[in-house]
Image (cartoon, helix red, strand yellow):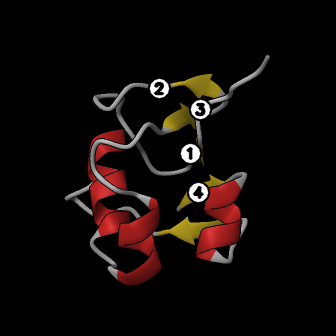
Amino acid sequence: MIRIRYFAHLRETLGTADEQLAPVPEIATVADLVAHLRARGGVWAQALVPGERLMVAVNQELARPETRVRDADEVALFPPVTGG
């Protein structure tokens, strides 16, 4: 299972802090995972708009869209951090 964790406004918009997702062949990378989640439609499509900035960590290390996602990985999705 892939553990997906949602932070900040994503957690609020999606109504969940985390979930478990069984690996499927179509999900090989971070980009594939985000597209899979977006394809659920509704609030998922609204929260994960293509082109919107999104930070992703795989196993607590910042990841890029092409980063591989495997069974037993933890993937965290969160908006970019801003400060002043």
24 relative to 58 in the view: left or right: left
Query: Which kind of residue does numbered mark 1 sit on?
Result: Val
> Measured from the top left, where is residue 17 in percent x and y?
73, 65
Between disc 1 and disc 4, whose residue precedes? Answer: 4
Between circles 1 and 3, the one closer to the viewer is 3
The secondary structure type at the circle numbered 1 is strand
Mark 1 and mark 4 in contact? Answer it, CB < 8 Å.
yes
Query: Which kind of residue does numbered mark 2 sit on?
Result: Ala
The secondary structure type at the circle numbered 2 is loop
Between disc 4 and disc 2, whose residue precedes? Answer: 4
The residue tagged 3 is 80
> Measured from the top left, where is residue 57 in percent x and y?
57, 33
The secondary structure type at the circle numbered 4 is strand
The residue tagged 4 is 4
Q: What residue is shown at x 61% (from left), y 71% (from top)?
A: 13
> Measured from the top left, where is residue 23 in percent x and y?
38, 62
Would residue 14 be visible to someone looking at this image?
yes
Between circles 4 and 3, the one closer to the viewer is 3
Query: Which kind of residue does numbered mark 4 sit on?
Result: Ile
Q: What residue is shown at x 52% (from left), y 36% (from top)?
A: 56
Cα gap from disc 3 to disc 2, whole angstroms: 13 Å
> Measured from the top left, where is residue 8 in percent x and y?
72, 52
Cα gap from disc 1 to disc 3, whole angstroms: 15 Å
Between circles 3 and 2, the one closer to the viewer is 3
* Label ID, residue 75: 1
Residue 76 quadrant: top right
Q: Residues within 10 Å of mark 4 (few under 14, many from 20)?
A: some
Cα gap from disc 1 to disc 4, whole angstroms: 5 Å
Residue 35 quadrant: bottom left
42 relative to 77 in the view: left or right: left
